[in-house]
Amino acid sequence: MNYPLRAVVARTIRRARNQRTRTRNQSGFTLIELLVVIVILGVLSGVVVFAVSGIQDRGNAAACKTDKKSVEVAVEAYYAKNGTYPPAGDPGWLELTVGVNQLLRSRPVGDGYTITLGVNGLVTAAGACT
């Protein structure tokens, strides 16, 4: 196929012009498009933050219930071993965590809840357990 040189040059020039006009028309994103994308990302991140905070609250509640049950088991084991319940308050915690009757490694503490030791082996929890 023998094309005349003039036709080849003309076709090359037309292609170059078309390519230049295409690049001018495709300048990129507008400011409005970018703002819409940023707003959508902000809404999605807000939804994720609130969903994760609910999971953390449920985790604290489960940890509180588990710690309370562990203390109740330790109090019953103390009763089975000694024939009486441990004293209420801090002396009872000392009986359960230190010395010959050590049935717990340490007094359970958690984020958002407290476990108390009462009279006659009553174990109560306040905070995230409720």
Image: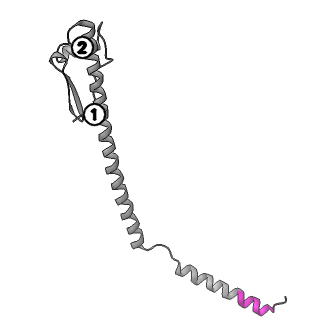
Which element is circle 1 on? loop
How many numbered circles are shown?
Answer: 2
Picture residue at 34% right of the left edge, 55% below the top:
47
> Which residue has dot 2 on it?
94
Camera-side residue: 27 or 120?
Answer: 120
> Which residue has dot 1 on it?
111
Q: CA distance from mark 1 to mark 2?
A: 22 Å
Outermost residue on the left side: it is 119
- Residue 59 quadrant: top left
Question: In the picture shown, does residue 18 fall above or below 82?
Answer: below
Q: Is residue 8 magenta?
A: yes
Task: Give percent across and percent down for residue 40.
Answer: 38, 63
- Name the residue type under label 2: Leu
- Residue 65 quadrant: top left
Question: In the picture shown, does residue 77 fall above or below 69?
Answer: above
Picture residue at 28% right of the left edge, 17% below the top:
74
Q: Earlier in the sequence, mark 1 or mark 2?
A: 2
